[in-house]
Amino acid sequence: MSKNSRNDISTARSALAQQIVRLTEKQNRLESDIPGLLLFRYEAPTEPISAMYEPSICLVVQGAKRVRLGEEEYVYDANQYLITSVGLPVVASIIMASEEEPLLGLVFKLDLNVVSQLMVDSKLPVSRSPNTGTGMAVSEVSAQLLNNFSHLLDLLDSPEDIPILAPLVQKEILYRLLMEEQGQRIRHIATKGTQGHQIAKAIDWLRVNYVKQLKVDGLAKETGMSISTFHQHFRATTAMSPLQYQKWLRLHEARRLMLVEQQDATTAALQVGYDSPSQFSREYKRQFGAPPLRDIKALHEMGQTEVLSGSA
């Protein structure tokens, strides 16, 4: 990378950081008026937190984060961005932040339908790759991408322009992503008929129907794959089996019901699809390190309702 390129990135990063500082005003998280755009700011490192990451790009312009997907770890700072192409259960933590230099960043959700249409409109070639690895990756950030996000944040100062101009800037961001290093990964998920797209559809089904009894053979049939091929590609994308994925969804929704809606453990267990409260308690302890009552009490004492937060 040339000296001029490094200077361009540094200038763009500094401008974006100043915008986030001004807009967050020491809030940890700000759901912006632009659909799918979240800003975040943290002034101290955090403990590892379980979260569901949506298809998105997560960018930090100051500080650093660590995300664990299965056995894989992804660490990124102001020089990189994290891209997630399907809904993935992760464990995330902020590893570099202070009052003097808080973690500053944003999350921008990817609309794969818009990506598909953009590929058609731009006459971009579809992905024919049989496998692009897990649905998560870290890439170097460019000055162009930083400037695109800065333009998007500019619109927050003129809300009346958001409905017309935000979709145009968002398309520019998506186009930039498609043309950069992770473009192949996004194209693979967004291209109908590919194994990545079929796995993404199976993930969407599980997220809506996690309470139902899981019949893997039926889900595999819907994707047009054999059971063994389906298992292979599902695990390659999510770092877990379909059953493990469903269990994660059930346990985290039960945790949310107890923490936010103050349901008791038995009611929460039944609501998310467990027939046996004792089995629920065992699996809950295995997942979170403590039985339901003790875990929820500890979360309340720490004020950690953000344990259920999304990509940020």
Image (tube, helix red, strand yellow):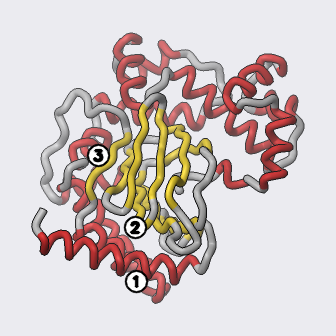
Name which residue lies at 80% across and 38% down. Answer: 295
Q: Position of residue 193 (x, y in %)?
A: 27, 32
Residue 285: which disc? none
Label 2: state its secondary structure. Answer: strand
Mark 2, Cα crowd under 10 Å, few <14 / some 14-19 / many 20+, is many
Name which residue lies at 25% across and 48% down. Answer: 182
Label 1: state its secondary structure. Answer: helix
The CA span between labels 1 and 2 is 16 Å
Q: Position of residue 228 (x, y in %)?
A: 38, 11
The CA span between labels 2 and 3 is 23 Å
Residue 186: which disc? 3
Q: Is residue 52 above or below residue 235?
A: below
Q: How many marks?
A: 3
Residue 154: which disc? 1
Q: What is the three-letter code of the residue carrying label 2?
A: Val
Q: Position of residue 198 (x, y in %)?
A: 36, 31
First of labels 1, 3 by sequence position: 1
The reply to whether discs 1 and 3 touch (Cβ–Cβ < 8 Å) is no
Label 3: state its secondary structure. Answer: helix
First of labels 1, 2 by sequence position: 2
Mark 1, Cα crowd under 10 Å, few <14 / some 14-19 / many 20+, is some
Q: In the depicted view, which residue is nearer to us: 147 or 207?
A: 147
Name which residue lies at 40% across and 83% down. Answer: 154
Name which residue lies at 73% across and 31% down. Answer: 272
Quadrant of the rendered structure where residue 189 is?
top left
Quadrant of the rendered structure where residue 176 is?
bottom left
Would residue 115 be found to the left or right of residue 63 on screen? left
Quadrant of image for the N terminus: bottom left
Q: What is the three-letter code of the residue carrying label 3?
A: Ile
Q: In the depicted view, which residue is nearer to us: 133 or 286?
A: 286
Q: Which residue is mark 2?
A: 61
